[in-house]
Image: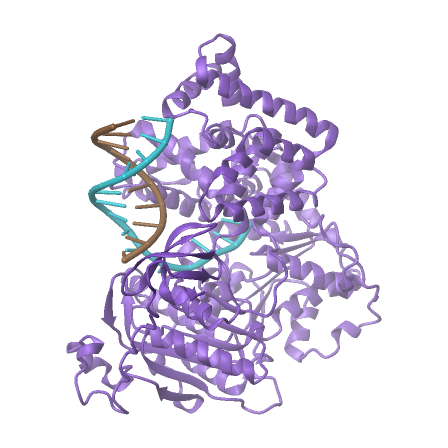
Chain colours: A purple, B cyan, C brown
Amino acid sequence: MTTSEPPSSPLFAPQPAQGESYLERLNPEQRAAIETTDGPLLVLAGAGTGKTRVLTTRFAHILLTGRAKPWQILAVTFTNKAAREMRERVGTLLGNPAEGLWLGTFHALCARMLRRHAETVGLTSSFTILDTDDQLRLLKQVMEPWRIDTKRWPAPGLLGVIQRWKDRGLTPERVTPTEDTDFANGHARAVYEAYQQRLKQLNACDFGDLMLHVTEILRTQPDILAQYHRLFRYILVDEYQDTNTVQYLWLRLLAKQPDGSANICCVGDDDQSIYSWRGAEVENILRFEKDFPGAQVVRLERNYRSTRHILGAAAGLIAHNDERLGKTLRSGREDSEGEKVRVIGVWDSDAEARSVCERAESLRRQGHSLAEMAILVRAGFQTRAFEERLVQTGLPYRIVGGIRFYERTEIRDTLAYLRVLNQPADDLAFERIVNTPKRGVGPAALQKLHACARSLSQPLSAAARTLLENATLKGKLGEQISTLLATLEATRELLAREGHVVATEYLLEESGYLDMWRQDRSPEAPGRLENLKELIRALADFPTLGEFLEHVALVMEHDENAQEARLSIMTLHGAKGLEFDIVFLPGWEEGVFPSQRTLDEGGLKGLEEERRLAYVGITRARKLALIYHAGSRRIYANWQPSMPSRFLDELPEEHIARKNEGGARQQSLRTTESLFAAGPLTATPGLSPTRRPTPRPAPAAPAFALGQQVRHPRFGEGTVIAVDRHHVEVAFEGAGTKRLLSSFIEKL
DNA sequence: CCTGGTGGCTTTTTT
DNA sequence: AGCCACCAGG
């Protein structure tokens, strides 16, 4: 996983820890969390209380006091990022690069264990890890014989059901009939079973299986479990509030030694549990002391990140939740109170975007770097308004968490080619590439291949060869497939002789894949070719193709080129674990935040989770948090009046400063006004307490004439060929014809 | 086999 | 309104 780590990283400068210096400058609670090494320990770590530091120092402490060897500690995180960070910081503390550790994400660690014991669950150690795309395609195939009405029971829904079962540690055998009534008239369990069978045939598993299989092995194979009991003397877990049931079972199995002891330390914050919708069980953390009798609990409540006002606002808000272990964030800093949290009402979502961007710009002029500012939204659709405005303003920004590198079509296609190369039996990958680029292999031809493969119990590629040999496949189609197989064969030889980088380049060229994009006239095509170059560059960082593919399957991320200072836009979920000097929190309106859907589906529990999300949002800010609510917002097609979020009422007055920049509704009027809620253009006179709403400015639509030469930041230069109220259609020289918001375009 | 039209949906996301 | 998935027709 870390094979690509540059050895020259300054973090690894030799700097052996002397004595117990690493324990200095820790507060008493932090020290307790580190020095209570034996027995179960729950560390409740509020936002900004030095959680990561405690975790890594504890790791080092165990090693430096000779309690365990590096490989006898199991350290688990949720994200690769967290794992990487921990590895680096442990390395720094120890004065050398941390290698050979059992430190990684739940999934990466499980993959490693599963490769050792794959036969136990009917796989071989070279099993493939499927991505969501593959899972869905496979499930659709498996579902067919049941003739399930896919209108009522769509495949993604069923995949969700299966995943949730896996999250709960339920193999098909463990799913009880009572569990299986709602979906597809009680066929879900049967489909699940068939799906698992098919995965075994393909020597593949999905993400859920990594956890599920290993847990099942630990449950049923006492000798293997004993082996890990002997190995792992200490277990560290990050973000415990996010664990789901299998993860919990897995941890408990590994932690509880035969003599009943358990050196497990879980760090988490029940107030930051925001992933229940994907199977996380807050109960895991709430129940810790019962699960591990004799557990000690340490609370980290001194916050070193944010000003007193920010902490006060966040604390006041979260106090409205009932189901908590209870924790009060106190400021651990000596400095001033800082500025109050701003709550700003604006006219509508456009005004909101304008106001946020103006303020960001003015803060930048005052010397704040854009890299230290973030806009945190509840849902993806909110980003658009900001993006448009930022482009217009010319402020550099980045959207965090859009489509990631390894999820792009061209990258997935290439990976499929590489998977076939690596494992000719990878049918899902073969299916993806056999007609990409178009080779005339449609559903009919594929059907034939499948039938043949099934009857011979062979993978698709082998079946194709057979059909070619006995001339069942002939003509143009046969020729195409035969060329593809020959190319793959030739590439395999090249792979052995020249290595995976050269082989990949050859394969992409010879298969016609690169030509497919070269001939593509869409504006994205050049970018895709760029991405492919980038992929090849990344490939060179790995010694073998297999290792590269393992990395991609588990890590799914890729560093894009280093960036100038940019304003970040991301979701609140995506912001967990990050911090910024200045945080913009737009869209605090009923229905948006808290989200209507969560309220409808999750009731009070849902509301509490939304509130925790709000808490996460506010506590991301070090110096200043600005919360926005708009009087009306465009949802799908039309403008709808919106009411301020109930969370705004829950913020303690003494820590906030309210301001109205437009016609936003006020809290006190919310309940009565909702009865008469009307669109902003018909706002009832007298209801706007401060001043009349500023009229919505006319859209800044510079008149474009047909034939006008224009420039777009991304698409380059072109000619205007049509105009309407907000949009301009432009024929670009390089990028084809596009309909764009006129505000993006500049006259030449 | 490919294209274009239609209908349904529309929170959050890691691995 | 826009995107995507699926189906009918050329």
Q: Quadrant of residue A382?
A: bottom left
Q: In which quarter of the image is residue A604?
A: bottom left
Residue at left 33%, top 70%? A701
Residue A623 visible in the displayed image? no
- Position of A6 with respect to A638 (left or right) is right
Residue at left 73%, top 51%? A71
Residue A7 against residue A566 in the figure, above or below: above
Q: In which quarter of the image is residue A642?
A: bottom left
Query: Where's residue A423, x and y in %?
Result: 59, 29
Of residues A386 and A77, the one nearer the viewer is A386
Query: Where's residue A568, x and y in %?
Result: 51, 68
Residue A535 visible in the displayed image? yes
- Position of A291 with respect to A697 (left or right) is right
Residue A608 against residue A549 in the figure, above or below: below
Query: Where's residue A444, x and y in %?
Result: 36, 22
- Assign the C terminus of chain A to one quadrant of the image: bottom left
Of residues A694 and A720, the one nearer the viewer is A720
Residue farthest to the front? A707
Of residues C5 and A209, the one nearer the viewer is C5
Query: Where's residue A587, x and y in %?
Result: 36, 72
